[in-house]
Amino acid sequence: MKQEIIFLSSGKCSWGKCFACGWGKLKGPEPNLHRLKNIIDKKFKKLKNIDRLKIFVSGSFLDDKQFPKSIRKYIIQKIKENNIKQLVIESRPEFISNESLSDFKGIDLYVAIGLECADNKILKKYNKGYTVEDFVRAAEILHKNNFKVRTYLMVNLPFLKDIKKDLDKSVKFAKKYSDEIVLINTFPHSESALYDLYIKGKWKPLDRQQFDKITKKYKNIEKDFDNFAFIPRFKQKPLVKGATKESLLHPYFEIWQDYIQRFYKNPSKKPVLFLPCAFKKPYSKSKLHKAIFSVVNKDKVHPVVISSPGVIPYEFIDKYPFNKYDWPEWEETSEIKKIYIQVTQKRIEKYLKNHKYRKYYCYLKYDSETYKALSKACKKLKIKLVNILPEHVYEKIKYRKNSLSLPEATKFLKVFK
Ligand code: SF4
């Protein structure tokens, strides 16, 4: 079955308060018939031989305030003209009525409802704004009108005592009222209350392995591990400053490390080259990184920086807070150096456990805390690490200014040219 998805932005979700949702808070352009018709015409021009069309709207397609009836009628007409067999839309239960469904006669319509879980206590805490009974009422109206119910259940919601038991209960319940069920991994949108919980370290999203383990028993049910491309984003962007434990374990660094360790996919066919950070941000603007990349070809090797925020694959160096932190070396005490090595070693270990490479290289000062942390991590994981800069060369240049930027040192990086 060939299916396509259309994202239509119009107005705002009538509710906008669900615990994990940030989209519902966003205000799209005013619902304007002329604008929407133009968008729809363009989208439909690209749709060829489609069996199933999904329309996603961040809110409710059946809400007149978000999508005026006339625009719904226009889309239905287009669907019929294009011989599209099935239509999937999303709506909150309160907009599902005989009246709002009347225009869809003759279409194989699925209405997706975010039940999330079949427990009113959790729904209340989740701030869903409707109950299990509201869902049932809406499902019955849909079936009476010969339409179908597509039910979203969220896996790993906050506030659950037992994720597996709760999911079992919800799946059993949803089966009674649904034609399709989708198990969705819970990810927090950046403007959501759940994101705050994640930042505070009180909740974590499931990674692929954890999600698959919990959901594999539900054989004929659709699973959606990452229905939006989650990446850490922060509304406030303060400078993270100071060579302190607080700064090293800053919650934003921790969120990023969790993301990089468990969700990021590395280019495993390449060798990795671990690099030092630089005071200038982004690192690519620093003298050191300019010197390194005047020699190194990024197609040949995967550069990864190790610094106080943790392990930073080079693709992320422009992202906040990797582009806005200061770890002044002159503020370092022997105590903080010890903590830095411990914390960084653990972060590297977690990274290397989840990300394999063809070979493992670094270009680091032998007496740096970063090198010590990396060496310990590799030793523990029995990984052969090669410092591309020979130790005897480093011994000769180590007291010179910007030693790692010197041609005597960077020439060894030519193996990655
Ligand atoms: S999850 Fe849906 S209903 Fe809830 S706020 Fe977001 S868009 Fe609105």
Image (cartoon, grey):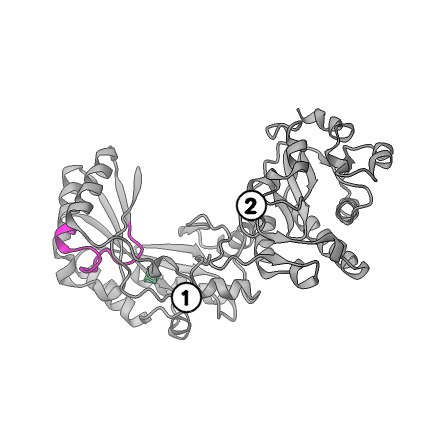
Q: Which kind of residue does numbered mark 1 sit on? A: Phe
Mark with earlier residue (2, 1): 1
Examine the rendered structure and indicate whether residue 348 appears above or below residue 191.
above
Q: Name the residue under label 1.
A: 19
Residue extending farthest bottom: 121
Q: Is mark 1 on a helix, strand or loop?
A: loop
Q: Classify residue 81 by image quadrant.
A: top left
Pinpoint residue 360: horizontal percent, then vertical percent. Answer: 72, 36
* 77 horizontally vs 203: left or right: left
Q: Indicate yes or no: mark 2 CB to ligand 1 under 8 Å.
A: no
Examine the rendered structure and indicate whether residue 394 appears above or below residue 378.
above
Does the magenta segment cover residue 258? no
**Image quarter (top left, top right, bottom left or bottom right) of the C terminus:** top right
Pinpoint residue 297: horizontal percent, then vertical percent. Answer: 62, 27
Residue 28 showing in the rendered view: yes
Residue 1 showing in the rendered view: no
Examine the rendered structure and indicate whether residue 319 appears above or below residue 407.
below
**What residue is rendered at 77% in x and 39% in y?**
401
Q: Is mark 2 on a helix, strand or loop?
A: loop
Q: Classify residue 90 by image quadrant.
A: bottom left
* 255 horizontally vs 155: left or right: right
Q: Mark 2 points at which residue?
A: 264
Depth order, front residue of 89/272: 272
Q: In which quarter of the image is ligand 1?
A: bottom left
Q: From which residue to which does the magenta span run?
A: 56-72
Q: How far apart are marks 2 and 1 (CA)?
A: 25 Å
Pinpoint residue 137: horizontal percent, then vertical percent. Answer: 24, 68
